[in-house]
Amino acid sequence: MSGNTVRLNAIKDVEAYVPPSASFTDSEAPGEIFGENVFSQVVMQKRLPKSVYKSVMATIEHGAMLDPLVADAIASAMKDWALEKGATHYAHVFYPLTGLTAEKHDSFFEPMGDGTALAEFAGKTLTQGEPDASSFPNGGLRNTFEARGYTGWDVTSPAYVLENPNGNTLCIPTVFVSMTGEALDHKTPLLRSQQAMGTHAERILRLFGHENPDHVVAYCGPEQEYFLVDRHFFLARPDLLNAGRTLFGAKPPKGQEFDDHYFGVIPERVLGFMMDTERELFKLGIPAKTRHNEVAPGQFEIAPMFERGNLAADHQQLLMSTFKTIAKKHGMECLFHEKPFQGVNGSGKHVNFSLGNAQVGSVFVPGDTPHENAQFLVFCAAVIRGVHKYAGLLRASVASATNDHRLGANEAPPAIISIFLGDQLADVFEQIAKGPATSSKGKGTMVIGVDTLPVLPTDPGDRNRTSPFAFTGNRFEFRAPGSMQTVAGPMTTISTIMAESLDYIATALETAVADGTDFDEAVQALLTEIINEHGAVVFNGDGYADAWPIEAEKRGLANLKTTLDALPELITEPAMELFENYKVFNHREMHSRYEIGLEQYALTIGVEARLTLEIGSTVILPAAVRHQTEIALNIGALKAAGVEAETAPLNEVSVPINALRSALATLKDALATDTGHEALGEAEHARDALLPAMAAVRLAADALEEIVADDLWPLPTYQEMLFIL
């Protein structure tokens, strides 16, 4: 079957698409199914003895250590609940350093001597598992022959039942560590960092008169962007299938320049998919809130409500796997790659971050007069200080070969880490830099000129989509994370730098008060010191402007443009001391993250390079040569008939064919180069040799796509993939 036939059949199949059955039935209220498959606090309260329930809640709400004596009672109740839900197996779910989700399934049922089977699930089975850990990335933390790794139950993230048409599974969120207790996952350091941050945030609250404050936790609300393409197109594109992004593709006649997709009417097929996913997310207790079209054609977004940081990270991983599954049900493929299509908007995963507890709410709520809200200003100053001191670590937390395609382009924040405060807060801190702040810019009202509309209030300042770390009213939004990555990495870094800043501030204030300084005066002096020393990181302007990198350099702000520029930040002495001091990572764990980052970078580009060579050699070049041959035969036939033939079309296609052959040869040589198999060397070779060679192949191939006859072109085009859905 020719490539064009595959494309045409795919288009016909899209037109003949029949949606699956409705997600919600008439007898099912969407609100009533929320959390129905979660072993939630409500379920635990009904099923656990009162003393056991109190013990578990002390761990969840106050960070108390779990009493091991209650594990058997919890396991028994959890098993009975899961069996009632139709579960036959249980699985410890963990998050290795691949960035993906891993799970090991075991049956509840064990054979008895009389030929029957009995469902068993002991407390020790709930709290600890032992999957084979030998093949996960570890960055030198363990040898290949060392297979033992342990999973440990994370009590603060509830178990849930995952449904399948052929049977259900009880899923238990866990950490994943080596025999030495070193973290082989993303969850362990996230929990460590949140614990450290909470300890020092509570010191600050006590200084402001909160006696015995509740445990302070980090909250996260990640906005997930993604693309949808028809699965027939997806399967006809080996690059999408294997790399998650298109390695070839000429710019279509129409892209996103009309902004007609952005927040437009959601296509019926996509809306059906969204409703179906939301039903599954609701059942799993994931608070999906917002859905809409994004900037690029075929691009969409979902945003959940705020949750505790580690729960939000777990739910994000579960959300992505749910989207993948439901998309196939609707005949589509969900793409989470940061840049699946060149020339159109890429996808991010904005991490909205706040701190708080049930007593004080979010500590980042400024109130109407933030200049008088000293507690808010102290926590805000901690962010300013932390982001300025550890901007390199924040950049490294979002570094990947895939996110390099997005950061720094005019669709995402620049790689330069800065903070946007907005007009109101910027003005307050400008006053603080010189002395006490005496005023705050207030809210206004819009004059629209339509009498029937109500008065609409305005915020004291606008938002800034070009800022990597922006204050957005009651939280900070870290806009640099990529759509494919786990939010646990950025959240771990944010919580750790906040722990250090809050520790610094608490110590300074405690010392000043002990020395007899008035508390309010001590706060004012500290705020002035912080904004004068770290205010260079505050930038309210256009991060896309050509002048900003120049200005940033004058301010001493680093511009770490690529992953290989950013990763060394992980193994600087200040970085390793920071994470060691707050017991988030030891030095070995930090070096392991650096090594894994290099390895993943090289592997990602290596796969793309081999795909580029394969597709260019076996798909695109043959199609172009067929086109060239047809032209040559036509010219020959005309000449044989004594008719003068135009040779320009032959020359037009021959030039890019020759360029493609040459570029493919260069790429093949680059792939064959021996780099010594050392992580840094392979990563640098990928950046310096493979990426330029791939770009040259693509340049020639995309030029051919624009001139080769449509009936010969083998790959679904951008025009088809982005607009036929």
Image: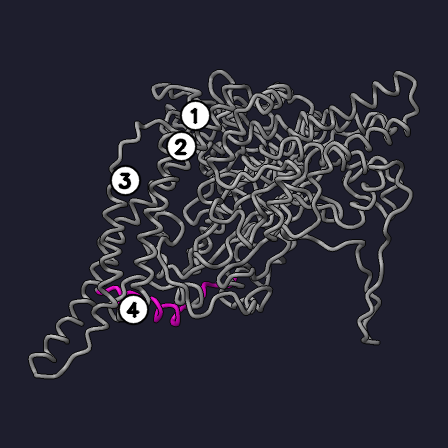
Q: Earlier in the sequence, mark 3 or mark 2?
A: 2
Q: Which residues are drawn in magenta? A: 2-22
Mark 2 surroundings: few (<14), some (14-19) or many (≥20) residues within 10 A: some
Disc 3: which residue: 671
Q: Amino acid at mark 4?
A: Ile
Disc 1: which residue: 139
Q: Earlier in the sequence, mark 3 or mark 4?
A: 3
Task: Tell which tag, 1 or 4, sits nearer the viewer.
Answer: 4
Q: In front here: 477 or 553?
A: 553
Task: Tell which tag, 3 or 2, sits nearer the viewer.
Answer: 3
Q: Quadrant of residue 144?
A: top left
Disc 2: which residue: 599
Q: Position of residue 584 (x, y in %)?
A: 59, 24
Mark 3 surroundings: few (<14), some (14-19) or many (≥20) residues within 10 A: some
Report, in whole angstroms, how far the alpha carbon at label 2 lies from the one at label 1.
8 Å
Magenta segment, prevailing SS (helix, strand or loop): helix
Q: Residue furthest left?
A: 640
Disc 4: which residue: 707
